[in-house]
Amino acid sequence: MDRESILRAAAQIFQEKGYHATSMQDIAEAVELKKGSLYHHVSSKQEILLALLDEALDLIIERLQIVEKKDLPPSLKLRQAMQAYFCFLAENRSLSSVLLLEHKSLQPEFIDLHLPRRDRVEQIWQKIIEDGVACGEFQSHQPALTAKALLGVLNWTITWYREDGSLTANKIADHFSDLFIQGLLIRNSSKE
């Protein structure tokens, strides 16, 4: 048994039962270990939660940084970032569920370890929007608030998106991209 298998099992159980309803015994049983043996790999349920949150954010940051580094107009960069982010959520359901629904279960001593990664994700979105404003492509008086709104829309999909639904993850991300980009674009104010 390895730590990665324990984390995968814990993510699935957290998704199904919620963090607070999951016991270390549940996790041990899922990986066919005795509870005492589980503690050879992890020290606590909080350690597991933090590890899952960090893993999810690291993977998201990695995907977003690939887009961030591209030499593209901000509107295309925003579209690709939304695709990358939403596809991550869709492809990693358990991990995404833990990230978006269980982060508030972190105890205070772990929150400070978690926040820099969470802030980094928001900063990437904010920078894309700020770049769009700076080059005259976007209008937004509050790029940080716009980034939070965008994340709110994307993150909420975890509660309703179904892999077997009528729209693929890519089509949903495209639709959301259209909504946000059209809302951000500067329009000619003269009537034609």
Image (spheres, rainbow, N blue to C red):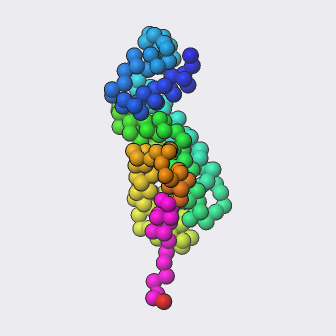
Q: Nearer the viewer, residue 152 or 44?
A: 152
Percent from the top left, x then y, of residue 122?
47, 51
| Residue 112 appears in the picture as rendered | no
Q: Residue furthest bottom?
A: 192
Name the residue rendered at 44%, 20% in the picture: 27
Relative to 125, residue 162 above or below: above
Percent from the top left, x then y, of residue 53?
47, 35
Q: Is residue 46 magenta?
A: no
Name the residue rendered at 42%, 27% in the picture: 13
Q: Which residues are magenta?
A: 175-191
Q: Quadrant of residue 104?
A: top left
Name the residue rendered at 53%, 35% in the picture: 55
Percent from the top left, x then y, of residue 85?
53, 49
Q: Nearer the viewer, residue 170 or 65?
A: 170
Percent from the top left, x then y, of residue 45?
41, 23
Q: Residue furthest left?
A: 21
Q: Count every numbered label the image shows and give the total.
A: 0
Q: Is residue 179 magenta?
A: yes
Q: Nearer the viewer, residue 124 or 78?
A: 78
| Residue 166 appears in the picture as rendered | yes
Q: Which quadrant of the rendered structure holds the N terminus?
A: top right
Relative to 16, residue 115 above or below: below
Name the residue rendered at 43%, 12% in the picture: 35
Relative to 146, residue 51 above or below: above
